Image (tube, rainbow, N blue to C red):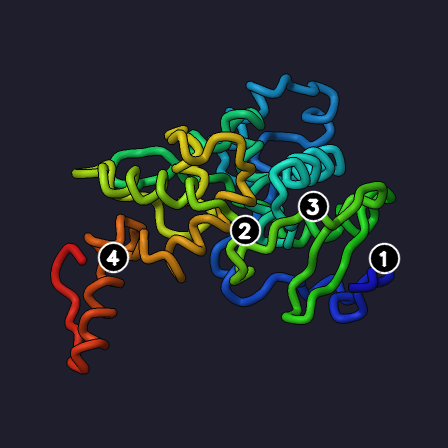
Amino acid sequence: MARNSRRPQKHAKRTGTPADAETQTMVTSASPTHGNAAASRKEQPNDASRRGNVLRSQCCRPTEADVVRALQSLYQDQLKPSSRTLRRRIGELAAVAPGDVAGLYVGPGANSRKLPSVDVALLWAVCERCSAILVQTEKDGDWTALLADRETTTFIDVFDPVDPFPVHVWNGAAAYFASLSGDDMHLPGGRYACAQALLARKPDFLANFTPGQVCHIVEIAMSQRKLLGYCNNSIVPYAHSFSMKKDRCALQQRTCVAENGG
């Protein structure tokens, strides 16, 4: 897709944001809560202190350096930096160091840590004015931020129906998911969060895969391989999922009613 001009026409007015309705309900803007802005610039707190302050305020107002850093990590992970993905990564890096992102998605019963929100209007403005970033409008009205000096062919299309993974990966995945029980069966809902939780567990069949590739594996495991499915708000092995119940009901041509607990 050809890259658009620096300011997408659809979002030229300051009063509008390029986020879709779903994202607008998830992310809200807030004024700085760390005291006087000028004083904050002079203090220049270290990374650990800054992450602690952001978590306490639960609001993140990214700088150009923050956005570029987040984009670089998404390129490394082979994840396309859509506005929603970029906001999430900025929140993750405000909470932990880059190498610890997967650990945010590990918790009892698939509960993942709540991330700081990101000022969406500020994020778009920062991306638009930064010479190192190109803003590209997508067909669905969303937008993507790209690094001007980097190739974009490295991103993984997580919804690509073509399965590029060898048989031994799927054999390993099937054995791993079949071995899970109790709380270990419950992974966070959502392909990205599920992928990060799996990466944190370090199963052998995912060795050397990037987060983008693992997101693709999760998608195929759910949509084609029938290795994973949903149970309430969690992703679980398919044999324990409501997805399996629905598939069986469809084969038997009868209505499927959800039970308590999935």
Q: Residue at x 50, y 26 (%)?
A: 100
Tell me which numbered mark, 1 or 4, is placed earlier along the sequence. Answer: 1
Find numbered disc 1 in the image and state the secondary structure of the residue it sits on: loop
User: Mark 3 and mark 4 in contact (Cβ < 8 Å)?
Assistant: no
Tell me which numbered mark, 1 or 3, is placed earlier along the sequence. Answer: 1
Nearer the observer, 173 or 123: 173
Q: Nearer the viewer, mark 1 or mark 3?
A: 3
Q: CA distance from mark 1 to mark 4?
A: 42 Å
Amino acid at pointer 3: Thr
Label disc, if present, on residue 232 of the rendered structure: 4
Corner quadrant of residue 174: top left
Q: Quadrant of the C terminus?
A: bottom left
Label disc, if present, on residue 164 of the rendered structure: 2
Compared to residue 14, the image places residue 10 above or below, namely below
Q: Nearer the viewer, mark 4 or mark 2?
A: 2
The residue carrying pointer 1 sits among few (fewer than 14), some (14 to 19) or many (20 or more) residues within 10 Å by Cα, namely some
**What percent of the width, then of the height, locates residue 133?**
80, 46
Label disc, if present, on residue 154 of the rendered structure: 3
Amino acid at pointer 2: Pro
Q: CA distance from mark 2 to mark 1?
A: 35 Å
Q: Residue at x 85, y 57 (%)?
A: 6
Amino acid at pointer 4: Asn
Tell me which numbered mark, 2 or 1, is placed earlier along the sequence. Answer: 1
Tell me which numbered mark, 3 or 2, is placed earlier along the sequence. Answer: 3
